[in-house]
Amino acid sequence: MTARMRLQPEAIGMGMTSQRVRDRLIERLREQGIRDERVLNAIRTVPRHLFVDEALAARAYEDNALPIGHGQTISQPWVVARMTEALFEDGAQPKKVLEVGTGSGYQAAILAALGLEVHTVERIGDLLRTARKRFRNLGLNVRSKHDDGRIGWPENGPFDAIVVTAAAPALVDALTEQLAPGGTLVAPVGGSGGQSLVKLRKDADGAIERIELASVVFVPLLSGMVD
Ligand code: SAH
């Protein structure tokens, strides 16, 4: 190995993932309309480069989705920011949150950094094992389960907030049912070409209000489990 090659990982660690590069992402998110300072701060703090393959670490603070293997992606930072921000709108103060689609673990880590009690479900065992290692290494307290997340996590519900990070043609009833009164659910709804990011609010009486936040592109919500 040449000296130049040996220097590369260090250059990545000190350059492309530096605080300055992360601050630039935060500025970009602000420009794109993200306002919640707690959410921006969580994104500034959680090291996104540790949630992707080392070979992609240099691109971790660009506002893009990146591949994480098994045909899946870590969501674009703006999408993570917008979904997370939505949970705190209208004076909501969620404590317990369910995420469907752990993937890299990044969205769960952001929620944990915000002090939420995080439950996350992933259908691909290999991705979940890697995400669990990241939670452990970063000292993040996240409860996770290898399962088909379309059934939610009824034993631990109801949840003040539910974040679905894979797309389905319609909202999943089992998940809406596990949303506590006053709770917020965010999910991409639509086909494989692109979806609408839907925010659903359940009021104290159980009545449901639904609004559309943005156009997004997510990988599909699939049934069953794989190792
Ligand atoms: N929140 C993730 C995004 C991962 S992409 C992150 O921050 O990295 C969506 C993830 O949803 C994929 O890992 C995919 O395997 C998972 N997924 C798809 N259908 C699912 C289902 N029915 N139950 C649980 N996870 C599912």
Image (cartoon, rainbow, N blue to C red):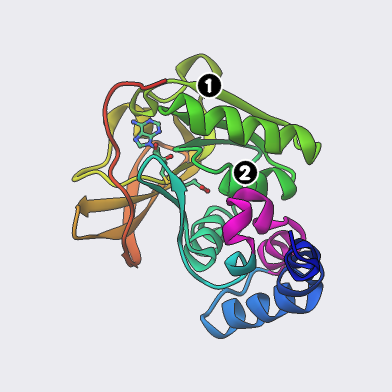
Q: Locate residue 185: give its quadrant.
A: top left
| Residue occupying the point 41% across, 25% down | 152
Say what amino acid the circle numbered 1 marks.
Lys
Residue at image mark 2:
94
User: Along the polypeptide, which appears first: circle 1 or circle 2?
Assistant: 2
> Residue at left 75%, top 32%?
136
Q: State the SS at label 2.
A: loop
What residue appears at the point 66 percent right and 62 percent down from the top-left corner?
Answer: 39
Q: Which residues are magenta?
A: 37-57
**Prevailing secondary structure class for the magenta stretch in the rendered image:** helix
Q: Is residue 95 left or right of residue 177?
A: right
Ligand number 1: quarter of image: top left
Residue 33 x/y as whole percent: 53, 79
Q: Does the rendering let one see residue 61? A: yes
**Residue at the front extreme?**
1
Mark 2 is surrounded, within 10 Å at the Cα level, by few (under 14), some (14 to 19) or many (20 or more) other residues, namely some
Q: Which mark is residue 145?
A: 1
147 vs 108: above or below: above
Graded by Cα atoms within 10 Å as few (under 14), some (14 to 19) or many (20 or more), the crowding at tag 1 reads some
Q: Quadrant of the C terminus?
A: top left
| Residue 21 shown left or right of residue 153 in the figure | right
The verdict on label 1 being within 8 Å of ligand 1 is no
Looking at the image, residue 24 sits to the left or right of residue 101; the answer is right
Identify the amino acid type marked 2.
Pro
- Extreme residue in the top direction: 155
Which quarter of the image is occupied by the N terminus?
A: bottom right
Residue 6 position (above or below residue 112): below
- Residue 154 image position (x, y, % from top left): 45, 18
